Image (spheres, rainbow, N blue to C red):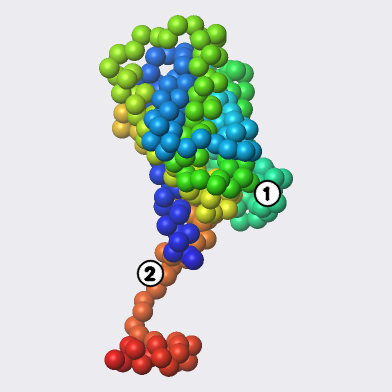
Amino acid sequence: METSSARSALITVVAPLAWGTTYVVTGELLPPDRPIFAAAVRALPAGLLLLAWRRRLPHGVWWWRSLVLGVCNFTLFFPLLFLGAYHLPGGLASTIGASAPLAVMVFAWLLIHEPPGLVRVTAAGVGLVGVALLVLRDPGGVDVIGVAAALGSVVMSSLGFVLVKRWPAPVDMLTLVSWQLVAGGLLLVPVAALVEGAPPAVDAGAVLGYVWIGTVGTVVAYLCWFHGLATMPAGAVSLIGLANPVVATLLGVVVAGEAFGVGTAAGMVLVLGGVLAGQPAVLAALRGRSAPRRGAGPADLSARSRPELAREAA
């Protein structure tokens, strides 16, 4: 059981590792000030391709459930995320996003009666402090729109993630993701046209950026994330998301030449400590691998059946 949970955690961590590239891709490759267009391009093409592959439509209650999940996880979350990225320094946006584990725990407690537990709440607090040390440097450039957008993205995604766990899907994860992406993307297209007008000019770099966030940053990431929600407590999954700003910071150092000092290193240690503290199965697996096994002692022999000993002797 512990090994299975540890494997689920390792699969789930792929999602925040992929999401951590969003800020640098948005800032370096995508056309500026087009958050809704970027969200639509990120969601709809990937959803249509997945739906064409899976060839299965929702039925019954899953028509409106797919719509609700699509609105929370994509129609509202994506534009708010991009809007926060455009209007806030990357460090501040990441710090606000790091409050998501606490929001997920609140929704999980209210909607699926999952108690957050003192350890996970403490781990979320430690991780939040770590993210602040990691990426929050200069508070200049903060505006109300950016902060509101970042907070809104946290609330919408946290609600959507808990609803995924509240409503176990009758289909495989690829199909579930396709339903949400199509529903969310179809709603984004007319909004982008009304609010932002004609599509922006797109160069080769922007195409590469859209392909990356649509495939790795969306399809692969959400498959791994929803796998975690299906197999682990929501609070534990949300803490894994704190790996997102760690990746964003490292990419900032490598790509943008940002400084990496003592405060950054201390923040990274706190973030990773918070993530691990909320994953008892991972810690147990690590302890099990590090524990020496020099053969069975008397207690081990007494706990094992005679047929087992006979098979080993043979």
Q: Of 43 and 266, which appears nearest the observer?
A: 43
Quick one: SS at disc 2? helix
Q: Would residue 42 be found to the left or right of residue 119 on screen? A: left
Of pointers 1 and 2, the one earlier in the residue sequence: 1
The residue tagged 2 is 290
Find residue 145 and report its horizontal and vertical position in percent. Answer: 60, 18
Q: Would residue 148 be found to the left or right of residue 314 on screen? A: right
Mark 1 residue type:
Ile
Give the CA separation, mark 1 to mark 2. Answer: 36 Å
Residue density around tag 2, few if under 14, some if 14–19, many if 20 or more, within 10 Å: few
The residue tagged 1 is 112
The residue at 45%/88% (across/down) is: 304
The residue at 39%/73% (across/down) is: 291
Mark 2 residue type:
Ser
Q: Does 311 appear above or below 199?
A: below
Is residue 112 visible in the rendered image? The answer is yes
Find residue 264 and report its horizontal and vertical position in percent. Answer: 43, 39
Q: CB under 8 Å between callouts 1 and 2?
A: no
Find residue 64 and report its horizontal and vertical position in percent. Answer: 63, 33
